[in-house]
Image: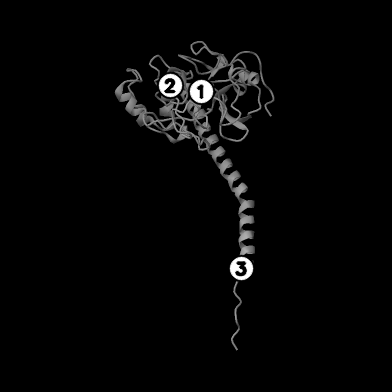
Amino acid sequence: MTQRRSAFTLFQLLVVLALLALLFALFLPAIAKIRLAAARSQSQNNLKQLALACHNYYDANNVFPPGVDAKHFSTVTYLLPYIEQDNVYKQVDMKKPVTDKENLAIAATRIKVFINPSDEVQVVDKDFGGTNYLFSAGSQYDLKDNDGVFFEKSKIKFPDIADGTSNTVMIGEKHLRSSNPEGANPPGTLYDPNYDIIAYSAGIQGSYHRRGGASWPLAQSPTTPQNMQFGSWHPGIVQFVLADGSVRGLRTSVPGTTLGYLTNINDGNVITNLD
C-alpha cells in the first residue's frame, strides 16, 4: 500500500515563515554588530599604518612632517613613501604649488589606507583623493602657531612633546556630517571644500587638520554640525593615534577640555586615565 504524504497546510506555512522572520530579526542585530566591529578594526589598522609612517618619517628626518608646507602640500604628501606609495610621491613636483595642473591630476588618486570603512559619507569629489583621517593641529584656532604636532610649517620633534608621547594625540578620525544642510549637494554625498577636500595634496590651507579643545569637542554623532572637529561613524567612540604610535579609542563623551589637553603637546596637563 502506498502512503500518502500530507502537504503543508496554509497554517503550517505561516508558522514556518513566522519562525524564519523571528530568526532573521534575532540574527540581524548580531550581523550588524559584526560589520561594525570589522569596520572599526579596519580603521584601527589604517591608523596603525599611518602611525608607523609618521615614526618612519621621523627616523629618517629627525622631525615630524609639517601639517602643511608653504606650497600647501599636506602631511600626507610627506608620508607617501612610508605607506608604500613611493611611485605616487615621485610624480609630485613639490617645487611647484599644489594647485599646479600636473599636481592636481596626481591628487585625484585614492589610496585605500586613507579611507575609513565605517564612514557612510566620504569625500567623493572627482578631482581629489580623499581621506577620513586628519592630523591634530592642537587646541588653538591659529594654524600658524598652534600647540599640536601638525600645524602650518610645523617642525615638531619628540623633545617638544613635553606632556609625553602617550598623552598626545597625533592623528584621528575626522567628522563627516551625514547630510548637507545647505542643500548644495544631495544628502549622503557631502562635499564641503572648507572641511573635507583634504588629500595628500591639498590646495586648501585649513583642510588638512582637525582641532581638539573646548571649542572643538568630539562630534557626538554623524549629524553633529561641522566645526573642524574629530569624529567618526563608530557608535560612541572615535579612534586616535597617539604620539607614541599606539591607537586607542576615546568615548564621544570625553569633554572638549580634556581633548584639548591631549592635542596640546606641552600644556602640562597630563591625562592619566581615559577609560
Residue denoted by label 3: 10
Quadrant of image for the C terminus: top right
**What's the residue at 34%, 18% (across, down)?**
97
Compared to residue 148, the image places residue 197 above or below, namely below
Q: Nearer the viewer, mark 2 or mark 3?
A: 3
Q: Nearer the viewer, residue 197 or 208?
A: 197
Which residue is located at x 46 percent, y 26 percent?
196
User: Within the image, what quadrant is residue 125 found in?
Assistant: top left
Q: Which residue is mark 2?
A: 74
Which quadrant of the figure contains the N terminus?
Answer: bottom right
Residue 256 seen in render: yes
243 relative to 37, above or below: above
Judge by depth and name the residue closer to the eye, 225 or 69.
Answer: 225
Amino acid type for the residue under numbered disc 1: Phe
Quarter location, residue 129: top left
Rendered location of residue 184, percent (x, y): 44, 27
Dot 1, crowdedness within 10 Å: few (<14), some or many (≥20)?
many
Q: Position of residue 150 (x, y in %)?
A: 50, 18
Measured Cα–Cα span from mark 3 to mark 1: 62 Å
Distance (Cα) linking label 1 and label 2: 9 Å
* SS at mark 1 in the image: strand
Rendering coords of residue 77 (x, y %): 41, 24
User: Callout 3: few (<14), some (14-19), or many (20+) C-alpha neighbours within 10 Å?
Assistant: few
* Earlier sequence position, callout 3 versus callout 1: 3
Dot 1 and dot 2 residues touching (CB under 8 Å): yes
Q: 154 and 22: which one is in front?
A: 22
Q: Amino acid at mark 2?
A: Ser
User: Label 3 sits on what residue type?
Assistant: Leu
- Mark number, residue 135: 1
